[in-house]
Image (cartoon, helix red, strand yellow):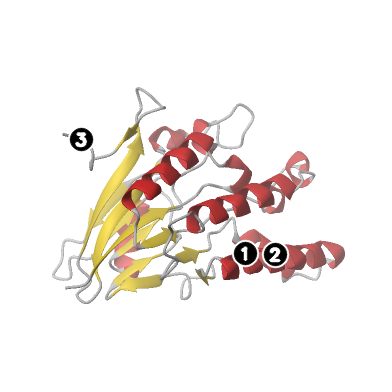
Amino acid sequence: MSYQSFVLVGDNHGSHTCPEWKKALLKFCKEVKPDRRFHVGDAYDFSCLRAGCTPDERRESVKEDLETGTQFLIDYFGQDGAKNKGDILTWGNHDDRIFVTAATKNGIVADYAAEIIKEIKKTCKQLRLKTTEYSIRKNPAEIAPGKFILHGFHAGATTAVRKAAQVFGNCIFGHIHQFGYWKEPNISGAEAYVVGCGSTICNGEPGSYNARQPAILSHERGWYYGVLETKTGDWILWKIVQSKSNPKKWLNPLKIK
């Protein structure tokens, strides 16, 4: 049998990347030395490009967002000891904002977006990353026979994970900033996992658009550690999650005795 270990993260949202999460994640990766590293999207936020954003949001610079998001990709995928074989980044809906903007005919704005994309692609190439565009058909990436990772296209705490299993089959995705699991009650038994986030957005900072959204009450920061059997597609996952009683502590089932 051919087993591969992996770490999977998502939704750090550029300038909203949680420093404590990033530090704990990189420490974990240094300890377990995964064979592969995955990111299921929303590495950037690009809030100024959000459809329906406020005038204040539209005036926000992308500089910090771009720098922080890119630095995370470098620190995560380019960490000392990273094997850089089979690593994948599936772009998310927030990342896609820059690609959509570059494809418009909005003059200098589209031109600037295109230059940003060049820099992002350059970084991904240096990190030997396979990337997938944010679309239903092209976003899912097969990491083992019949097993996929993707960003996610559905919302709702229970609906999203159930729909993911029905539409994409066996998969792991992000998008909704919380952990979850669903197994289809049929002969196929397709199962879907959703990973928590790596951003401060789930704090619901005063004045933010999601501060009044009940959904953030179920948001959690963390990541998945897993093992794949590359020939059969068998897999097993463990979640590492931030403690609710002590935010400085990360609950790691691999170390609980």
Kindly identify which residue carries mark 1: 123
Judge left or right: residue 12 versus residue 163.
right
Residue 45 can be seen, yes or no: yes
Outermost left residue: 187
Judge left or right: residue 205 versus residue 167.
right
Q: CA distance from mark 3 to mark 1?
A: 37 Å
Quadrant in the picture for the C terminus: top left
Q: CA distance from mark 2 to mark 3?
A: 42 Å
Q: Residue 8's x, y, as percent?
A: 38, 55
Q: Residue 125's x, y, as percent?
A: 58, 71
Q: Which residue corresponds to the image point at 46% horizontal and 75% vertical from the top-left?
A: 137
Tag 2 near tag 3, CB within 8 Å: no
Tag 2 near tag 1, CB within 8 Å: yes
Report helix, strand or loop for mark 3: loop
Q: Amino acid at mark 1?
A: Thr
Q: Residue 25's x, y, as percent?
A: 42, 44
Tag shown at residue 119: 2
The first of marks 2 and 3 along the sequence is 2
Outermost top residue: 245
Image quarter of residue 2: bottom left
Kindly identify which residue carries mark 3: 256
| Above/below status of 206 relative to 144 | above
Judge left or right: residue 114 versus residue 180.
right
Quadrant in the picture for the N terminus: bottom left
